[in-house]
């Protein structure tokens, strides 16, 4: 298996419970409680024994393909196929690599080549089979796996050092980088969670995260490690806060993991429709800074006893700190700390010389202990740069330098303060600005480019590309970038500039660009024609922090996301007495189309249209 040439030290063996693979948690529950529901999808359940036997059958087939010690790609939908494929790959002694359907095909092609993937687990879609590199063995989950398993479980002897998964994150050089995560740190995480969370036997956890996000693993194995049931949800429901809220309530979900932006949208929706998921017991946030907004306070105020957990950790370590918020939400801090180190992790704030800083002083967040990834696949130089010897630890131990800035308060809690380089978090995803800049520079119109984050009060964090080019810029730049970049990495605006600002030392002055005022503008061609269109225009301008929006401008091309769309839909339903959902809006993402739908669904003849609300 390719690796980042990172050394396999004893750090992963030192304190990891059991010293073996993560499958032990699933196997323990399967052995003691085989009939408990392990996973549920569209009202159908598979017990631990049923799920285990199905995965064993696939694992036995994978063993005949000699996958042990290699990377197995998984490209499938959010159905039973996904947990079956993950368990089977691990059972066969392989590491799994999730391939997200939402990623552009060129990005997936690179990941498959770079990882050295030999086998792809997938299924047929209405458009046919997903492409795979030459020489790849494609196993169709619904067709190619022999039936009639004899119940013999393939022998698995994973060690703490063996790889469990490879997840690709944004790379500063223009190509994504694969984080190679062994079993040891993951066992440590799940062991800590089993002792920390209230979820236990029979608890129902939503599978919310995308498979390409490391939280997806945490959702699965923290649930199975305590005898809980993983509740799968279709993508159409997951990204629609109205339908998701109803799903959480009707499916009696006890625990959900989600980034702050998704929690904020859910909280707004709950307030708008007057419905709260009464079965909820725990909400776990991670991936970006958690803010306790008025909407979040109201949401938890309506659900007394529900705990909010804030977790922190990059893909190179998974989660390594945690903070639990409970009691009266009115007392919760507006900007939540990321808490203290979990078991076995050593999370410190260090100065430039590698020394701990006093409380209240800013430094770099540095992570040590048996919680580190092996490194980056095929990137020995980058691995050596980010995974360095631990200046405060025993010989052979390493730390991961996160590049995040933080400080420790007088209670010993760590506060995340931001980045000290070109890396940002957008909607929970880690994004290297350099990768986006490389993609923009590859456009024939661009002589140079810089991408910065613009903070909007209503629209949140937005990526803005400043392009050295002759104005006006073509209207299709975003569409062309979408051929190579995931949706969350696409700028909402492209601003032509004569030259990029530089610091006195000759470096790009990102602060000068970020300080520029920006208003996203529509085409301005075809203003609203009637009262409904005019009121929709006002709503769009408020939510997108935009101006000059025309009746045929596309909401998503102006920087709208599914989460912002959920807020807009709530306002539309409240104002017009309609019942639109995300699916309705995606099919009608322009003011004219949405106005036509509203007029068809609602009797507006007796409703005065307010333009000042």
Image (tube, rainbow, N blue to C red):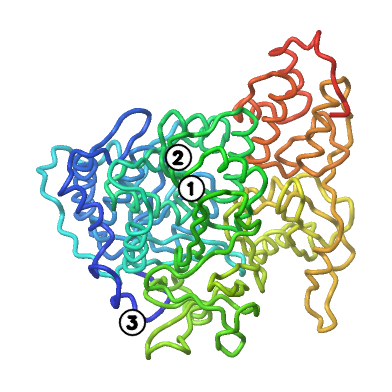
| SS state under label 2 | loop
Image coordinates for residue 559, horizontal then vertical, percent: 72, 45
C-alpha distance separating marks 1 and 3: 35 Å
Above/below status of 605 relative to 483: above
Q: Quadrant of residue 585?
A: top right
Residue at 78%, 28% (x, y): give it. Answer: 591
| SS state under label 3 | loop
C-alpha distance separating marks 1 and 2: 8 Å
N-terminal-most mark, 1 or 3: 3
Disc tally is: 3
Answer left or right for 283 relative to 374: right
Image coordinates for residue 322, horizontal then vertical, percent: 48, 62
Residue at 74%, 20% (x, y): give it. Answer: 576
Q: Which of 175 and 564 is in front in this view?
A: 564
N-terminal-most mark, 2 or 3: 3
Above/below status of 520 relative to 344: above
C-alpha distance separating marks 2 and 3: 41 Å
Q: In which quarter of the image is residue 433?
A: bottom right
Asked if the residue under mark 2 is in contact with the one under mark 1, i.e. CB atoms within 8 Å, the reply is: yes
Residue 9 circle label:
3
Above/below status of 424 relative to 520: below
- Depth-wise, is mark 2 or mark 3 nearer the camera? 2
Answer left or right for 393 relative to 511: left
Q: Which of 329 and 53 is in front in this view?
A: 329
Residue at 39%, 36% (x, y): give it. Answer: 124
Which residue does the numbered mark 1 point to in the structure image? 283
Q: Counting other residues with Cα less than 10 Å from the Cα at mark 3, is it few (<14), some (14-19), or many (20 or more)?
A: some
Residue 209 in sight here: no
Image coordinates for residue 226, horizontal then vertical, percent: 29, 50
Which residue does the numbered mark 2 point to in the structure image? 280
Residue at 81%, 8% (x, y): give it. Answer: 605
| SS state under label 1 | strand
């Amino acid at each position: 298996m390719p690796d980042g040439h990172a050394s396999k030290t004893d750090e992963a063996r030192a304190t990891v419970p059991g010293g073996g693979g993560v499958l032990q948690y699933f196997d323990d529950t399967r052995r003691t409680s085989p009939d408990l529901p392990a996973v549920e999808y569209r009202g159908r359940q598979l017990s631990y024994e049923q799920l285990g036997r199905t995965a064993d059958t696939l694992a036995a087939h994978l063993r005949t393909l000699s996958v042990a010690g290699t990377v197995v790609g998984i490209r499938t939908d959010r159905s039973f196929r996904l947990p079956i494929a993950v368990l089977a790959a691990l059972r066969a002694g392989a590491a799994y690599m999730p391939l997200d359907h939402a990623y552009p095909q060129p990005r997936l092609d690179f990941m498959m080549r770079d990882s050295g993937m030999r086998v792809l687990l997938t299924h047929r879609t209405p458009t046919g089979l997903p492409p795979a590199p030459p020489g790849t063995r494609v196993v169709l989950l619904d067709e190619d796996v022999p039936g009639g398993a004899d119940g013999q479980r393939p022998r698995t002897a994973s060690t703490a050092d063996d790889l469990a998964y490879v997840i690709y994150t944004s790379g500063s050089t223009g190509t994504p980088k694969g984080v190679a995560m062994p079993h040891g740190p993951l066992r440590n995480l799940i062991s800590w969670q089993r002792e920390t969370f209230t979820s236990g036997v029979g608890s129902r956890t939503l599978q919310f995260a995308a498979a390409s996000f490391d939280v997806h693993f945490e959702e699965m194995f923290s649930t199975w490690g305590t005898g809980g049931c993983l509740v799968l949800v279709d993508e159409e429901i997951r990204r629609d806060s109205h339908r998701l809220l109803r799903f959480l309530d009707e499916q009696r979900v006890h625990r959900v993991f989600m980034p702050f932006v998704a929690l904020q949208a859910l909280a707004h929706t709950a307030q708008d429709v007057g419905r709260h998921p009464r079965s909820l017991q725990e909400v776990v946030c991670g991936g970006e800074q958690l803010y306790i907004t008025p909407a979040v306070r109201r949401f938890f105020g309506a659900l007394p006893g529900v705990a909010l957990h804030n977790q922190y950790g990059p893909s190179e370590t998974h989660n390594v700190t945690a903070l639990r918020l409970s009691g009266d939400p009115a007392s919760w801090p507006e900007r939540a700390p990321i808490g203290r180190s979990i078991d076995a992790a050593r999370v410190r704030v260090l100065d430039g010389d590698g020394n701990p800083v006093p409380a209240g002083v800013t430094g770099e967040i540095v992570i040590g202990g048996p919680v580190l990834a092996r490194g980056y696949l095929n990137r020995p130089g980058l691995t050596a740069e980010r995974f360095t010897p631990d200046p405060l630890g025993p010989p052979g131990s390493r730390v991961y330098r996160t590049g995040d800035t933080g400080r420790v308060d007088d209670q010993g809690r760590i506060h995340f303060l931001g980045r000290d380089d070109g890396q940002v978090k957008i909607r929970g995803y880690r994004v290297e600005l350099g990768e986006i800049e490389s993609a923009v520079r590859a456009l024939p119109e661009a002589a140079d480019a810089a991408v910065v984050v613009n903070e909007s009060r209503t629209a949140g964090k937005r990526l803005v590309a400043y392009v050295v080019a002759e104005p006006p810029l073509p209207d299709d730049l975003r569409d062309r970038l979408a051929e190579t970049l995931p949706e969350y990495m696409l700028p909402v605006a492209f601003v032509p500039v004569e030259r990029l600002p530089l610091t006195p030392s000759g470096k790009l002055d990102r602060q000068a660009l970020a300080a520029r005022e920006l208003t996203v503008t529509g085409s301005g061609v075809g203003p609203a024609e009637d009262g409904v269109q005019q009121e929709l225009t006002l709503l769009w301008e408020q939510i997108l922090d935009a101006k000059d929006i025309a009746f045929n401008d596309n909401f998503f091309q102006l920087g709208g996301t599914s989460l912002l769309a959920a807020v807009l839909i709530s306002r539309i339903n409240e104002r017009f007495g309609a019942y639109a959902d995300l699916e309705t809006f995606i099919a009608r993402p322009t003011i004219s189309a949405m106005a036509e739908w509203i007029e068809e669904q609602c009797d507006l003849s007796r409703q005065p249209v307010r333009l000042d609300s």
